[in-house]
Each structure stands twice: as C-alpha cells, then as structure tokens.
Image (tube, grey):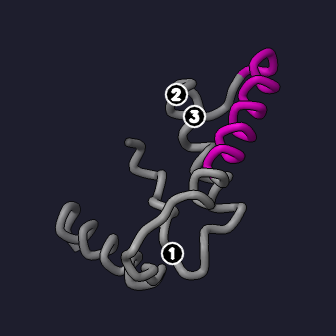
Amino acid sequence: MCRNIRPLNNFEPPATGDEVHAAALQYVRKVAGTTKPSAANQAAFDRAVDEVAHTTRHLLAELVTTAPPKNRETEAEKARARARLRYGA
C-alpha cells in the first residue's frame, strides 16, 4: 500500500471529501506510475481519480464496526512516534 494513503474509516468526525480525494489521487498516481500525467492522459487520469473517490465514499458509508471511533490527533501522534522510531529524532 502507498504510505501516503491514510486509513479513512472509523474516525470522528468522518473523513472529509478532501481526504477521500487525496487518497484517490495517491492511489491513481501509484497505479499509473506517474504524479503528473501527459496532456493526452489527463482526462483519463482525472476520471480515474473521481471514480476511485466516488467508490471510496460509498465504501466508507457502508462499512460497519463495533470499535469506538478513532481520534485524529491521537492517531497522528502515534504515526509521529512510529516515524521517530523508524527515522530517528
């Protein structure tokens, strides 16, 4: 999985449209193998991002969990702690 794509499920407040779009963009970039498509591929690239974002919103709306919602700040601090261990401080 691409490291820049963050889990979006079970957060309070729920994932925003911008977060879903950013995850979709990272996914399509990874699959396409490019961060900036050529002019000839731009329309297909943009359409793919929109479709992945649309499907992601549907997926998040339908997922069910019994776990309590996660706090964004707590999860961000956990990620920073993992990064400090991985890369040093």
**N-terminal label among 1 and 3:** 1
Q: Which residues are magenta?
A: 38-56
Q: Which residue is mark 2?
A: 31
**N-terminal label among 2 and 1:** 1
Quadrant where the C terminus lies? bottom left
The amino acid type, in three-letter code, at marker 3 is Arg
Q: Residue 45, position in %: x, y? A: 72, 28
Residue 29 circle label: 3
**Is 33 placed left or right of 67 in the picture?**
right
Quadrant where the N terminus lies? top left
Q: Residue at x 67, y 46 (%)?
A: 53
Q: Residue at x 39, y 74 (%)?
A: 66
Q: Residue at x 70, y 31 (%)?
A: 48
Q: Which residue is mark 1?
A: 11
Instruction: Identify which residue, 64 or 86, lies in the foreground.
Output: 64
Q: Residue 18, position in %: x, y? A: 70, 61
Residue 67 vs 7, above or below: the answer is: below
**Is 69 placed left or right of 87 in the picture?**
right
Question: Which element is circle 2 on?
Answer: helix
The amino acid type, in three-letter code, at marker 1 is Phe
Q: Are marks 3 and 2 in contact (CB under 8 Å)?
A: yes
Q: Are marks 1 and 3 in contact (CB under 8 Å)?
A: no
The amino acid type, in three-letter code, at marker 2 is Val
Residue 74 lies in the magenta-colored region: no
Residue 45 lies in the magenta-colored region: yes
